[in-house]
Image: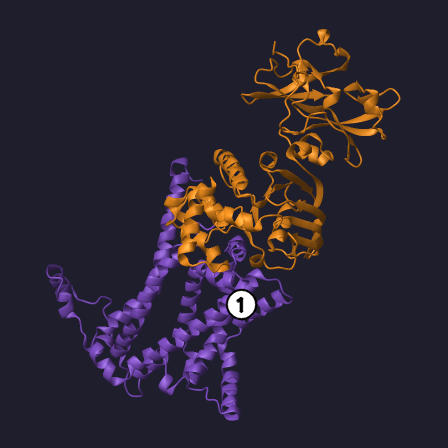
Chain colours: A purple, B orange
Amino acid sequence: MIPDELRLTEAGKEVLFGLLTKAALGCLLLYALFPIYWMILSSFRTRAEITAAEPSLLPFDRAEFTDILSDPTLILALLEYENYVTMWGRFPVFDYFVNSLIIATVTTVLALAVGCLGGYAFSRYRFPGKSAVGGALLGTQMIPGILILLPMFLLFIWVQETLSFPLIDTYHGIIFVYTTFTVPVAVWMLRGFFDSIPTAVEEAARVDGCSRFQALVRVVLPMAAPGIAATGMFVFLVAFNEVLFASVLAGGDVTPFAIGIQSFETQTTAYWGEMMAASTVATAPILILFVLFQKPIVEGLTEGSVKQ
Amino acid sequence: MDATRFPHYHEHDNQNHNTMSRVTIDDLTKVYDSANGSIVAVDELNLTIDDGEFVVFVGPSGCGKSTTLRCIAGLETVTDGTITFGTKDVTEQKPKERDIAMVFQNYALYPHMTARENMAFGLKMSTDLDESEIDDRVKDAAHTMGIESLLHDKPKALSGGQQQRVALGRAIVRDPEVFLMDEPLSNLDAKLRAQMRTELQQLQHDLDVTTVYVTHDQTEAMTMGDRIVVLDGGELQQVGTPLECYHRPANQFVAGFLGSPPMNFLDVKADLEDGVLSHPGFALSLSESVTGQIERTELVLGIRPEHASLVSTPDAHPQSDRLIEATVTVTEPMGDVTNVYLDIGGESITVTTDGYPGVQADDTVSLLVPEAKIHLFDAETGTAIKHSDEPIDSTATEETTQFAETAGRS
């Protein structure tokens, strides 16, 4: 038996629960952010520091920290920039990055275009086979990618040979593959967002002189903007980060960044520092883009449309 | 509002609004197919709404009033029947081809547009007016609705009442053939609702545009419309002026739906030979003129709370044999009137008296139910057999004898 004076009050329980939740979230956050921290840290290190038997968890030693505390500008002097200079010369890092941007951006545009129309149809129309088609779309996500890699490769070869239409190592080839992966998810995500938009607003637009398509473009899509942005971010990330299909189907001039940085690991040496520097440089713009996009997503644009 | 303040509308009136906007609904039927079978939302509805008329559809949830409105708007397809505007059959037309404007219950403003853009949107989409003409009309409509200062705000910056005005402004700026309003006031608080009720009536009167107004609120139905259309279960119950429907209800449903507190109903048996209505708690004699109208014996007696009265001096009353003894269960003082709830043979009866009824719970009182004021309905079909003799012309003056004597008044 716990003595009464040791029992927690309701308020006490709430505080304790809050602390435990925060601690758990803190651990998860640490787990998620540590690799990124290690990436940035390694990018500023020399080869010897990276391959040391016991690498330091912190960027500076005790003496350096004391110096930095007295003069913060010393940070810049103490960092090792060499990786950021040499990485550009060793491999076409910039081209890899541009390839990734092209592939991810076009995939996002295509997946959103199809996803908006499909998601809207699923949200607003009743048609035969609706649940079957919806289930099939979701079902595609349960097949591991590796299972369709080989068939996809053979298909690409077949198209190339019979139709003389090049697909392997082309932008449109890999964009086609990524679009087929992401459209089902985009349709499902956007369907949810369209469901949350009251039909009355659309009906008002139709009474105001819009066709259904005009009502979709002029009223529904602007209202779904946060959802479209969220879906777009998701699709962009999938296309930007994909490795498996790109490693087989997108080489040569269209090599994306995720594949390209592997070239820093050669048969004889691994240029860890430069690889980490290149990764940091490639991550930064995406991160900034997403921080900018977060605002419209969090800020519900539909607020004020209808009285709840 | 006068003609000089709102020039476009009156110009338009003279050109088009003569019989052009009569709305005729013929055998309108709407059936929804669902997984559990089909649901008849509207069943062979026939109705003609005159040009410039303000018609209110009223009924409980699911009675088909909103569905009918949406069929008129073209937002629902029609299963059977036709809808005609003037001489033009619009049954198969898209909403945008019908020259209508609609006000929705939740206002349905475009959240990404300012109030001005919300109001201009319909003109931009459906007319070839240039920017400055659109701007003039938006300003006129904003002036009418008193929202000039809000034109640059987006809906989320506006209060519920202001959003409602923008929604109305968006409808009137279109200068449509027909206004459709789907419970436009039900999201406002009580005070604002009462204010908008009169304002809307005034607006409709000034614009003189055929208006179909849907509500479940019987106060709105009674006060706003030229005629009201009472619906239940997808079927038309009665069409008439508010006072007709109130005092000459076609059936027990209409009688019970209109009025607050509602009409009292008591199951009675008619003894046609003796001319007596009998109930476990009382027996009421009927005059020959009334018994002559009765063919069945199973009846429902209806009496409106304001037509029954409490008698303070039963012994001295000239009709003392017609008085019914009852026990007061609850009194509900409303200030101007008091609702007194009585128990008669286990059934509850409401009587509306003046503000000071002079009775309290558990008092035994005498109730006068004047024969002229009672309604009788067929117990099986609900069809009305006899109505009260209240005048249904709203300009009629009350006869002095119609003042009910109330206990405590002297």
Q: Is residue A213 visible?
A: yes
Residue B287 x/y as whole percent: 81, 20
Q: Nearer the viewer, residue B243 or A36?
A: B243
Q: Is residue A226 above or below residue A160?
A: above
Query: In front here: A259 or B176?
Result: B176
Residue bearing mark 1? A118
* Placement of B149 over or under A229, stated as above or below: above
Is residue B276 left or right of B130 when viewed as pictured? right
Secondary structure beneath label 1: helix
Residue at 64% in and 30% down: B259
Residue A96 at what x, y percent from top left?
A: 33, 80
Decide which of B107, A248 is in the foreground and name it. Answer: B107
- Residue B169 point in image, percent of width and height: 47, 47
Identify the amino acid type marked 1: Gly
Q: Residue B307: x percent and y percent?
A: 68, 22
* Residue B103 appears anywhere in the view: no
Task: State left or right for residue A251 relative to residue B279.
Answer: left
Q: Judge the density around disc 1: few (<14), some (14-19), many (≥20) Cα neighbours within 10 Å.
A: some
